[in-house]
Structures are given as structure tokens and as C-alpha cells.
Image (cartoon, rainbow, N blue to C red):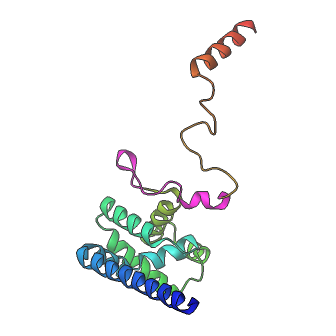
Amino acid sequence: MATHNQLSLSRRRLLQGMGILSLGALCDSLFPQRRAMAAELEESGFITVSSLLVSQPVSPLLAQRYYDALQRHNNQFATQLATLQNYLKQHAFAHVDDFIAATDKASPQFQTASTIIAAWYTGLVGDGAKMELIAYAEALMYRPTRGILVIPTYGGGPLFWLNNPATHNQTTLSSGAQA
């Protein structure tokens, strides 16, 4: 009898798996634009270039968001990325440090690379009032201290509003008046 229950459970899992795969295929056919965007990202080489420039694997989901934002902010970005990718292939750099050492800082390739690196590390794309936040907690500048320090926010940290701000100001003013 235990064998029969195990077979039922196995069939149930098989049916669940088939249902999930069918749902995935259905979603893919319902959203062809998503597939086209993924294909464009793959063809652009943005993930490969980004991985070299930041010296670590990058998230494909974030890569799509950065790529789209960089294109929105610079209509020549796709061409600049292709030029950078060709330059990287010609020189076969093993690490971003090799690229930095061998590339003129004023060159278009270096400028494009700097834009990509800055986007990944800060989580921001664009300048001034047109700056766009793509990632905050996932920005690479926080990775070295992940798990050790809390990612800063606009607040003053845990329990910041524990004391009423008006009480805090009165305490500060009264202690200043005594001095």
C-alpha cells in the first residue's frame, strides 16, 4: 500500500510540473515583446560587457533595466556599446584593470565603459533632473558590506523616530540655553 501512495504522489508531482511548464509556455506566447527584449539584450552583448567591467556576474533582470535606461538617456548607446564590445574583443582583456591600464581615458570606449560601470555601482542612469533610479539596494556599491551593514536609507537608522522630533528639538534648545 505504501508503494501505491508513493506512485500517486509521483504522478501528482508530474502533473504539477507539466502544469507549470504549460503555464510558462503560455505566458511566453502571451508576452512576445518580453522575448524580443531578451533577445535584443543577448545580441547586444551588454551582459558580457557588464560582467567584464564590474568583474563579477550580473543579474540579467537588472541588466535589462540598465540597458533600457541607458538607451533612453543616450540614443547612440547601442552603437557605443557595439564599439566598446569590438574593442574588448580585439584586445581580449582578461580583467577590467587591464582595460583601464591600456585605454586612453578620453577615448569613446573608456567613456562608454565608465557610464556602464557607474550605472551598475550607483544604480543610477542619466544626469541632473533626468537622472533615473534603476536599483537601490542592488547597486554594486553596497555589495562589499552586504550582511555586515544595513543599506542606508533616508531615515536616521533603526528607531530613529522613537522620540518625538518636537521633544528632541526642545531638549536640544534647553541644553543649549544652559550652556
Of the 4 image quadrants, the one containing the N terminus is bottom right
Rendered image quadrant of residue 32: bottom left
Q: Is residue 135 magenta?
A: yes
Residue farthest along the top direction in this orientation: 178
Kindly identify the residue that appears in the image at 72 percent across and 12 percent down.
Answer: 175
Query: Percent position (x, y) of residue 44?
Result: 36, 79
Query: Percent position (x, y) of residue 47?
Result: 45, 76
Considering only vertical position in the picture, is 43 above or below 178? Answer: below
Rendered image quadrant of residue 81: bottom left
In the image, 1: left or right of 85? right
In the image, 167: left or right of 72? right
Kindly identify the residue that appears in the image at 59 percent across and 46 percent down.
Answer: 152
Query: Percent position (x, y) of residue 28?
Result: 29, 78
For this rendering, which residue is in front, 80 or 10?
Answer: 10
Rendered image quadrant of residue 70: bottom left
Residue farthest along the front direction in this orientation: 1
Kindly identify the residue that appears in the image at 55 percent across and 75 percent down.
Answer: 57
Residue farthest along the right direction in this orientation: 179
Q: Is residue 103 visible?
A: no
Considering only vertical position in the picture, is 173 above or below 64? Answer: above
Considering only vertical position in the picture, is 168 above or below 22? Answer: above
Q: How many marks?
A: 0
Query: Percent position (x, y) of residue 34?
Result: 29, 73
Of the 4 image quadrants, the one containing the C terminus is top right
Per the rendered image, the range of residues in magenta is 125-146
